[in-house]
Amino acid sequence: MKENSFKIIIALIFLIAFNALFFILGGTERTQTEWISYGFIHAAYLLLLMTPLFCNADRGQTVLSATLYLHALMYFFLELIVGIGFIWYNPPSITWPAIIQGGMLVIFLVIHLMSVLANDATKASLSKQRKERIYIRSLAEDLHEAMHKVTDPDLRSQIADCYETMNRSTLESFPEAEDAEMALEDAVTNLCTCIEQGDETRVKQSITSVQTAIKKRNRAIKMARHSY
């Protein structure tokens, strides 16, 4: 609550200072050009204050947010300079002040919205990568834990090979590989269940199923990657 209050106070400092100077130095009787510039400056400042609404709050994505802040700051300072220039010069026609400042606003909005869309796509890609890492690493850890419950050295060695192969496998995934990944997950789950039950015959069969599933998954991903 205290932090939000400070943010509001800081945000109001510019508005109070600018409006005080605007009305003290020139009064309330202003031309259309001055009011247009006055409005564009306030719009630019409002867009700067609204920037956090478009930013990603997740850790590790501060670079994406920094780009949006940079665009908003650049537009605000540029509009402030241009707007004050028009207020000081005060041309008789509102045509060029409106065109120039309106054009600046449109250009900023296009760039800003494109950046927001790009950031959303990047965020989705990062989220996908995290899920992919969690998926394959989770299956590998299941194998690693199950391996220590096996007393037969030969079976344990085979499970260790499966574990190492999965660790070396790509973390990347594609929709085309979904069936192969589900089959791999089922094979690993079945192997862990057989180990818990102590059925060595089924453990041997399950190890073979896991090895086959890993190969199919890697082959499916390789084919899918080449198709893009």
Image: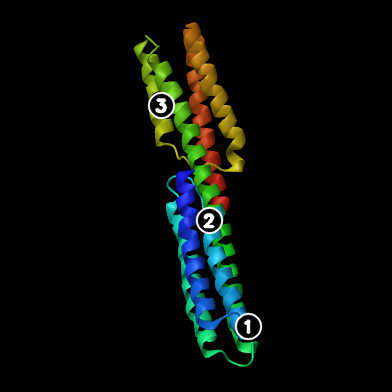
Quick one: label 1, few (<14), some, or many (20+) residues within 10 Å?
some
Query: Between 41 and 74, which is closer to the camera in this rendering?
Result: 41
Percent across and percent down for residue 57 are: 49, 47
Q: Which residue sits at x=37%, y=10%?
A: 152
Is 183 situated above or below 131? above
Q: Name the residue under label 1.
A: 98
Estimate the x, y position of residue 44 in percent, counting from the top left.
Answer: 55, 69
> Which residue sits at x=53%, y=43%?
128
Of callouts 2 and 3, the N-terminal one: 2
**Disc 3 marks which residue?**
163
Tell me, yes or no, whether the two marked residues, 1 and 3, touch with CB atoms within 8 Å.
Answer: no
Circle 1 — which element?
A: helix
Front position in the image: 147 or 115: 115
The span from disc 2 to disc 1 (Cα, nearest Å) is: 31 Å
The label nearer to you, 2 versus 1, is: 1
Residue at image mark 2: 119
Picture quadrant of residue 47: bottom right
Report x, y in % for residue 109.
59, 68
**Residue 102 point in image, percent of width and height:** 62, 78
Q: Residue at x 49, y 21 (%)?
A: 208
> Which amino acid type corresponds to the residue marked 1 in the rendered image?
Ala
Disc on the earlier residue, 1 or 3: 1
Q: Which of marks 2 and 3 is in front?
A: 2
Q: As drawn, which residue projects farthest toward the bottom?
A: 92
The CA span between labels 2 and 3 is 35 Å
Q: In this view of the protein, can residue 167 be seen by the observer? A: yes
Using the numbered discs, state the Cα–Cα distance from disc 1 to disc 3 in whole angstroms.
Answer: 66 Å
Q: Which amino acid, mark 3?
A: Tyr
What residue is shown at x 51% (from left), y 50% (from top)? 56
Identify the secondary structure beneath mark 2.
helix
Q: What element carries label 3?
A: helix
